[in-house]
Amino acid sequence: MANNHLTSRGFLLRLSFALALVLLSYNPSPYSYYNWIVASFEQFNILVVPAGVLLLIGWTMYIRATLRSLGPWGLILAFGLFGSLLWVVIDWGIVEISNIAAISWIIEIIMALVLGVGMCWSHVRRKISGQVDVEDGEE
C-alpha cells in the first residue's frame, strides 16, 4: 500500500513542478517554449515538437488533477484569492500596473500556486475532513 500522506517536501515538489511547467511554457524573458516556437518560424528546430508534447503532457496532468481536486468552484475561489492579493500588491504600490513584465511574472506564479494547490488539495481535504475521494478507492 502506498503512502498517501502529504508532506511539506511533497507539496514543495508538486509546486516546483507546477512553477517549472508554467515558466517553461511562457514567461516574459526570452527563455520559454513560446519564444522558442516564435524563433522556430524563421529556422525550424525539430526539438520543439517533443518538447511541446512533454509540456502538453505536463499541462494535462496538472489541469486534470486540479479540476478533479478543486472543482470549478474551488478554481474560482483559488484564482479569486490569489487575484485579490495581486490587486492588493498593485493598490499598495508595490508593483506598478504599467510594469507588464512584473505583472506577468506574478500572474505566472499565481497560476503555478493554483496548480500546485490543486495537485495537493485532495490530500489536504482528506486530512481535514476524513473524507476519501471516490478515485482513492479503499485504503
Image (spheres, helix red, strand yellow):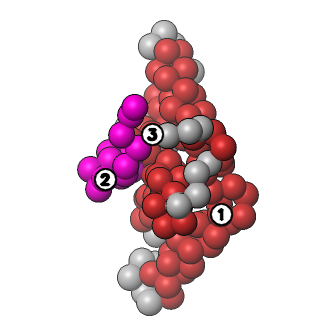
Q: Mark 1: which amino acid?
A: Gly
Image quadrant where residue 80 sits? bottom right
Q: CA–CA distance between discs 3 and 1?
A: 21 Å
Q: Mark 3: which amino acid?
A: Leu
Q: CA–CA distance between discs 3 and 2?
A: 21 Å
Q: Earlier in the sequence, mark 3 or mark 1?
A: 3
**Residue where numbered disc 1 is placed:** 74
Mark 3 secondary-structure assignment: helix
Q: Extreme left residue here?
A: 9
Residues marked 3 and 2 touching at CB (< 8 Å): no
Q: Earlier in the sequence, mark 3 or mark 2?
A: 2
Magenta span of residues: 1-15
Q: Is residue 40 above or below residue 108?
A: above
- Front position in the image: 20 or 65: 65
- Front position in the image: 55 or 62: 62
Q: Mark 2: which amino acid?
A: Thr
Give residue 125's position: percent from left, percent from top: 53, 61
**Residue where numbered disc 2 is placed:** 7
Nearest to viewer (mark 3 / mark 1): 1
Query: Going 49% across and 40% down the picture, which residue do you hit?
Result: 139
Give residue 101's position: percent from left, percent from top: 45, 60
